[in-house]
Amino acid sequence: MTLTRYFASTAIAAAAALFAPQAAQALCAEPNGPEPGMYENVDSDTRSITRMRVEFVCGSERTQNPDGSGTIRHGADPHWRIWLWGSCSPTDCEWGATRANMMERGAYLYGHYDQGFAERDVQVFPEGDDRLRLRIRSRYDDDRSARTSVNIMELR
């Protein structure tokens, strides 16, 4: 290979790499809101919510299929997700995940659980550094009256 051909092929390869389509980048940024992560109730003897996980979902979502493979769903709109665990024995009861939206221009997150026997409105407020105030209003489908619980959760 002549020196001229070498430089020409190198220049063509460099130009191709420079203008090649790049992998899609996330088109959203995590907004102001709670620090994503796992939170625990500051009251270790609570009979209410023991743990809470908060995350921000930006764009595509990956889900686990029963056969172990994964599925990627593209185009999901950016949103928050909350998981809750309630005090149960011998281990905590996972409530599962629910979608949450930022309300009142970033004042708090709001999510909703429909557990069949009860519907629960969940609000998550900032409560100082590494702490969140979790307020849950529960409405039952039997003769029990609605109730509200408030817990302080700390990032772990």
Image: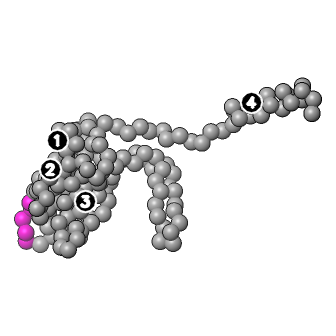
Q: Earlier in the sequence, mark 4 or mark 1?
A: 4
Task: Give the residue type at disc 2.
Answer: Ile
Task: Give the residue type at disc 4.
Answer: Ala
Which residue occupies 18% across, 73% down? Answer: 89
Which residue occupies 41% across, 37% down? Answer: 29
What residue is pinned by disc 4? 15
State the SS at label 3.
strand
Report whether 70 appears left or right of 109.
right
Report whether 100 appears left or right of 119.
right
How far apart marks 1 and 2 lie (CA) works out to: 8 Å
Task: Give the residue type at disc 1.
Answer: Glu
Q: Earlier in the sequence, mark 1 or mark 3?
A: 3
State the SS at label 1.
loop
Answer whether residue 146 is magenta in the image: yes
Which residue occupies 10% across, 61% down? Answer: 45
What residue is pinned by disc 1? 127
Question: Does 81 appear above or below 146?
Answer: above
Q: Mark on residue 84?
A: 3
Which residue occupies 45% across, 50% down? Answer: 76
Q: Earlier in the sequence, mark 2 or mark 3?
A: 3
User: Contact, CB < 8 Å: mark 1 with mark 3?
Assistant: no
